[in-house]
Amino acid sequence: MKLRDHYQQAVRKFQPKPSYLANSFQAFISGGLVCAGAEGLRALYMNSWGFSSDAAQHLMMLTVMGLAVLLTAMGRYDALSQFAGAGATVLLTGFANSLASAAMEHRTEGWVSGIANHMFKIGGVVIVYGMVIAYILGVIYYIV
């Protein structure tokens, strides 16, 4: 037991101390920039190309998710998420990254047992919990 305590003390001595306030601020700004960029795309689709509000919103989501998948495929999303922290996991980009990275990692196992199976192991959890929370909030909204 004594050896373990000495080891843990030695490890703590050399571990970097994270700056929680600076990291939170950086994630807040990064996530805000991602969302502002997405809103700018929506406005561009509506004002410049004449799409309806719903169509522009769908195109914006498709573009943001496509960019996240492209960055994941190029190996750049990890660097972005290292810098932005939780700000890079804004719902659309984080979900697209998780699906794309699972697909890339398991592509050698085949289309069904590799890509599809592992993509939806990760993505299925997000979809199920999203539906459960939406149902619970819908019931609460109906009661109140």
Image (tube, grey):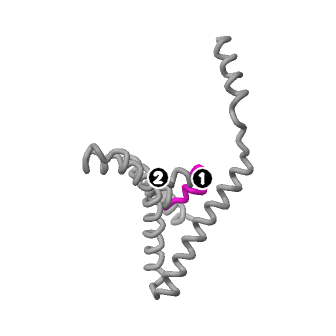
Q: Please tell me whether mark 1 sits on a helix, a strand or a loop.
A: helix
- Asked which quadrant contains residue 54, the reply is bottom left
In the image, residue 58 sits, relative to residue 17, either above or below, namely below
Residue 94 % position (x, y):
50, 56
Q: Which residues are magenta?
A: 81-92
In-image side of 135 versus 120 (left or right): right
Dividing the image into 4 quarters, which one contains the C terminus?
bottom right
| Residue 105 belongs to magenta span | no
Q: Residue at x 39, y 51 (%)?
A: 124
Q: For the residues marked 2 and 1, what is the alpha-carbon distance in whole angstroms?
A: 18 Å
Residue 13 % position (x, y):
73, 27
Dividing the image into 4 quarters, which one contains the N terminus?
top right
In-image side of 72 versus 119 (left or right): right
Q: Residue at x 57, y 76 (%)?
A: 40
Identify residue for label 1: 86
Identify residue for label 2: 75
Mark 2 crowd level (few <14, some 14–19, many ≥20, 10 Å Cα):
few
Magenta: main secondary structure equals helix
